[in-house]
Amino acid sequence: MTLDIVVIQPLIALIAGILILLVPRLLNYVVAIYLIVIGIVGLWPRLPYYVPH
């Protein structure tokens, strides 16, 4: 089984939801980390084209 964005995204959402229910103060950190990870995953395939060599 390969892990790709279709599998990883629901797992991250599930873990984040459980953490938010257990510790509501973590909401800011969980949302920030989630957005950063999704942004990096979305840009990763195109990143080598924009980085100067």
Image: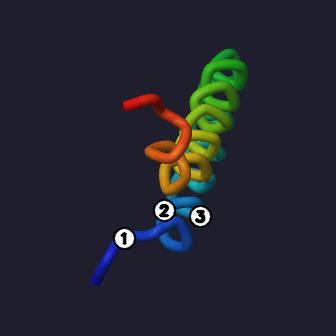
Q: Which of marks 1 and 3 is nearer the N terminus?
A: 1
Q: In which quarter of the image is residue 28?
A: top right
Residue 18 on image: x %, y %: 59, 45
What is the crowding at mark 2: few (fewer than 14 residues within 10 Å), some, or many (at least 20)? few
Mark 2 and 3 residues: CB-CB less than 8 Å, in contact?
Answer: yes
Residue 19 on image: x %, y %: 57, 36
Please report the residue visible at 48 percent of the width from the left and 62 percent of the height from the top.
8
What is the crowding at mark 1: few (fewer than 14 residues within 10 Å), some, or many (at least 20)? few
Q: Which of marks 1 and 2 is nearer the N terminus?
A: 1
Q: Which of marks 1 and 3 is in front?
A: 1
| Residue at the disc numbered 2 | 8
| Residue at the disc numbered 3 | 10
Q: In this view, does 38 lie above or below 30?
A: below
Kindly state the secondary structure of the residue where label 2 is placed.
Answer: helix
| The one of 9 and 21 positioned closer to us in this rendering | 9
Q: Quadrant of residue 23?
A: top right
Side of 35 relative to 19 (left or right) = right
Please report the residue visible at 59 percent of the width from the left and 64 percent of the height from the top.
10
Kindly state the secondary structure of the residue where label 1 is placed.
Answer: loop
Please report the residue visible at 58 percent of the width from the left and 55 percent of the height from the top.
14
* Quadrant that contains the C terminus: top left
Q: Residue 3 — which label? A: 1
How far apart are the two marked residues, 1 and 2, measured between alpha carbons? 7 Å
Mark 1 and 3 residues: CB-CB less than 8 Å, in contact?
Answer: no
